[in-house]
Amino acid sequence: MTDRMSLLEFPATFPLKAIGTGPEDFEAIVIDITRRHVPDLPGGCTRTRLSGAGKYLAVTITFLAESQAQLDALYAELKDHERVVMLL
């Protein structure tokens, strides 16, 4: 476990939201990255919302998180992607 305490008890249902540019394929990018860390990602686990101007897409993926280390690795990879503007 990391030095910081987690407020979550694992496994836990976890909603991750990524906001990014290029709405036409951003959802697929987020799903591909998430699948590297959550191999058993179920179908139909995503919701999307297009910004008013159509420049950004918010993708929410809800999955069963197994550990804080898993979440940290997933967030790190998403954060490093050039198209990701914000993670919640």
Image: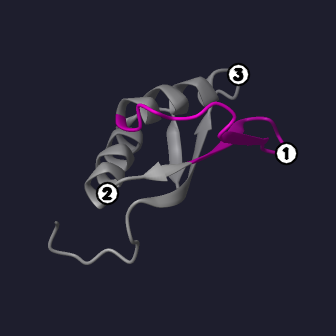
Q: Position of residue 21 (x, y in %)?
A: 61, 34
In this rendering, the label closer to the viewer, 1 or 2:
2
**Quick one: label 1, few (<14), some, or many (20+) residues within 10 Å?**
few
Q: Is residue 3 above or below residue 20?
A: below
Between the C-alphas of marks 3 and 2, the distance is: 31 Å
Q: Which mark is residue 52?
A: 1
In this rendering, the label closer to the viewer, 3 or 2:
2
Q: Position of residue 73 (x, y in %)?
A: 29, 46
Between the C-alphas of marks 1 and 2, the distance is: 35 Å
Amino acid residing under circle 2: Ser
Q: Which mark is residue 67?
A: 2
Residue at (38% x, 78% y) in the render: 7
Q: Which residues are magenta?
A: 37-62
**Quick one: label 3, few (<14), some, or many (20+) residues within 10 Å?**
few
Q: Give the total of numbered labels.
A: 3
Q: Is residue 81 above or below residue 6?
A: above
Amino acid residing under circle 1: Gly
The quadrant holding residue 9 is bottom left
Do we see residue 88 in this rendering?
no
The quadrant holding residue 53 is top right
Q: Which residue is mark 3?
A: 24
**Which of disc 2 and disc 3 is earlier in sequence?**
3
Name the foreground residue: 2 vs 79. 2
Name the foreground residue: 28 vs 45. 45
In the picture, which quadrant includes the N terminus?
bottom left
